[in-house]
Image (spheres, rainbow, N blue to C red):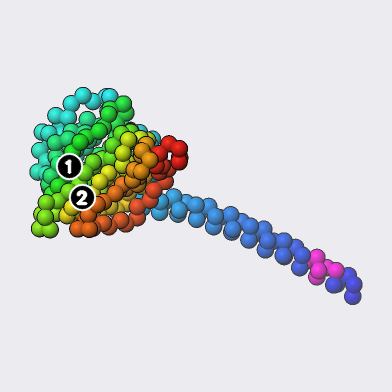
Amino acid sequence: DAKYFTERALAFIDHQRDVAVAFDHTRDLAARITRKLAKICAFALFGNMLSSFEYVESWSSHTSAASLQTAGASNSESNPYLIYNGAQFAWFFQNKTSNAYAKLMSNIDLGTYNYNLSKTYSGTIVLDGNGFAVSGLKNEAIFRVVQGSSSSAKANVTVKNLMLNVAISHSGDAAAVIRKVNNYSSITMTNVSVFGSITGTGSSDAVGALVAWSDSAYSSFSFTNCINYATCCIGFHRC
């Protein structure tokens, strides 16, 4: 009768409402679990990069790199120079231009220091960012020039697990990692990301986040999981 079908209809509506409520709860729970897993996965993948700009060792708070020079490192990939601050960072790239290994142990802020080293790097050089960041590059790339001497004596530069936050303006070619790659060089970069801005102030300069330019057919490049977020400009009128 009508009463029977009305009661069944109302019961069906109540059931559907319960199902909908249960679905909403399940969906909200799934969303929370997904967000939690995403955070866990991101931490597993990027580690220290998640908080790279939360804390930095300032250049101005250190005046000597003696601790790096006497740290007892054997200058090998398994026992590299350990860099904790801007002074040590600059000392390493000023004095170790061939066959050298370094690993960051903290976020580095070069601050007001004018990092502008006119050096040419050769042999094997490995910079392991260890998931940390370098900030404060304003005038020059980390490596100004990389150059080997022959096919049997190549320059092999490896940069990995590093974040850069730069504001570089240079009256010539400009880059964050390597400005110029010359003859007989092998460049490998893995998990390197660049933020900020890079500007070559001339009208015909080469600008790049990782490498500005190479003039050699005898060099090779490998880039894996490298990302550029920086603005790259050639000449102020084009930025």
Image-based side of 234 in relation to 190, left or right: right
| Residue at 58 percent of width and 54 percent of height | 28
In three-dimensional space, the C-alpha distance between marks 1 and 2, rounded to whole angstroms, equals 10 Å
Verify CB contact (< 8 Å) between mark 1 and mark 2: yes
| Residue at 10 percent of width and 38 percent of height | 72
- Where residue 50 sits in the image (x, y, percent)? 39, 44
Residue 49, by quadrant, is top left
- Where residue 29 sits in the image (x, y, percent)? 55, 55
| Residue at 67 percent of width and 63 percent of height | 19
Q: Evaluate whether residue 95 shows in this view.
A: yes
User: In this picture, is 172 found above or below 217?
Assistant: above
The front one of 50 and 35 is 50
Residue corresponding to mark 2: 182
Image-based side of 3 in relation to 76, left or right: right
How crowded is the residue under tag 1: few (<14 C-alpha within 10 Å), some, or many (20+)?
Answer: some
Question: Is residue 35 on the magenta stretch?
Answer: no
Query: Amino acid type of disc 1?
Result: Thr
Q: Evaluate whether residue 165 shows in this view.
A: no
Region rendered in magenta: 6-11
- Where residue 44 sits in the image (x, y, percent)? 36, 52
- Identify the element where label 2 is drawn: loop
Image quadrant holding the C terminus, namely: top left
Q: Residue furthest bottom?
A: 1
Disc marking residue 120: 1
| Residue at 45 percent of width and 53 percent of height | 38
| Mark earlier in primary sequence (1, 2) | 1
How crowded is the residue under tag 2: few (<14 C-alpha within 10 Å), some, or many (20+)?
Answer: many
User: In this picture, is 133 found above or below 110?
Assistant: below
- Identify the element where label 1 is drawn: strand
Of circles 1 and 2, which is in front?
2
User: In this picture, is 20 found above or below 53?
Assistant: below
The front one of 57 and 202 is 202
